[in-house]
Image (cartoon, rainbow, N blue to C red):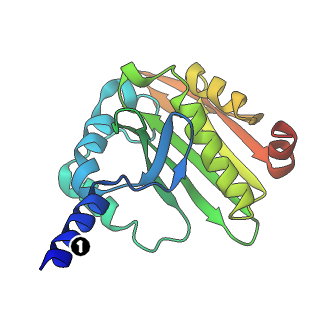
């Protein structure tokens, strides 16, 4: 009887411990959880301030977002992770490694920090660096790309801090706020990452 109670207490304690996939100084990256994260995701991707910099242009409802969550199961071409502040355990954004090509050893990253209060504090840069290290040194990828709208100076600066280099410009490839905007294509190679982290 006594030992059973102890086991139950241990199980409760285990459930309250945060799930950690990758850990940095200020943030952790963990798998997205449909039950706890879907509301934040819906709020962020429907927010006009956030939406102006991402691919989504139509409103996303709960059913659509729920289907997206369900489609993540056993998808070996992408991983989507929650960015969580270690200090407060707050889910502040999402980061992804997608379009993984296991033959060419390449992939693409994307990221968003949800609320303005959490931007410009280094969380995104730390999240991106954690994911890059994992992609290069655990998955064995060689080339990671990212795209950013030319007017998204914050995103471009973050990518540069992480070692990405500009490869080219896709002219007038996006339409936002009544005008066409260039997309900037950036990339980082494994050798660039190694040099940056000597």
Answer above or below: position of 191 versus 26.
Answer: below
- Residue 183 position by quadrant: top right
Determine whether 131 is above or below 158 in the image: below
152 and 162: which one is in front?
Answer: 162
**Horizontal side, residue 134 vs residue 88: left or right:** right
Q: Residue 185, percent across and down?
A: 69, 38
Relative side of 190 to 81, left or right: right
Number of marks in the rendered image: 1
Give the x, y percent position of residue 129. Answer: 65, 41
Q: Could you tell me if residue 59 is visible in this image?
A: no
Residue 177 placement (x, y as % from top left): 40, 21
Residue closer to the observer: 91 or 172: 91
Q: Residue at x 50, y 59 (%)?
A: 79
The secondary element bearing badge 1 is classed as helix
Q: Is residue 159 above or below residue 38?
A: above
Give the vertical position of 185 relative to 74 (above or below).
above
Residue 58 point in image, percent of width and height: 30, 41
**Nearest to the observer: residue 157 or residue 11:** 11
Does residue 55 show up? yes
Residue that appears at 76% across and 66% down: 104
Residue highlighted by disc 1: 7
Which residue sits at x=70%, y=34%?
162
Task: Tell me where residue 142 sits by quadrant.
Answer: bottom right
Q: Quadrant of the C terminus?
A: top right
Instruction: Identify the residue at horizontal 48%, vertical 48% (top origin).
Output: 29
Question: Alpha-carbon neighbours of circle 1 within 10 Å: few (<14), some, or many (≥20)?
Answer: few
Outermost front residue: 2
Q: Answer with left or right where residue 191 lies relative to residue 32.
A: right
Quarter occupied by the N terminus: bottom left
């Amino acid at each position: 009887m006594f030992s059973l109670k102890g086991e139950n207490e241990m199980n409760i304690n285990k459930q309250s411990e945060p799930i950690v996939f990758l850990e940095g100084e200020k943030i952790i990256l963990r798998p997205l959880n449909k039950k706890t994260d879907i509301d934040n995701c819906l709020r962020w991707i429907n927010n006009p301030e956030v939406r102006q910099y991402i691919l989504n242009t139509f409103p996303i409802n709960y059913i659509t977002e729920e289907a997206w969550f369900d489609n993540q199961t056993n998808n070996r071409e992408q991983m989507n992770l929650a960015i969580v502040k270690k200090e407060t355990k707050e889910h502040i954004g999402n980061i992804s490694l997608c379009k993984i090509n296991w033959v060419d050893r390449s992939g693409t990253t994307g990221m968003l920090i949800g609320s303005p209060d959490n931007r410009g504090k280094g969380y995104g840069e730390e999240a991106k660096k954690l994911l890059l290290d994992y992609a290069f040194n655990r998955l064995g990828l060689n080339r990671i790309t990212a795209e950013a709208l030319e007017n998204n100076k914050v995103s471009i600066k973050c990518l540069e801090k992480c070692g990405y280099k500009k490869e080219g410009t896709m002219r007038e490839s996006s339409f936002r706020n009544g005008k066409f905007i260039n997309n900037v294509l950036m990339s980082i190679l494994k050798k660039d990452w190694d040099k940056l982290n000597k």
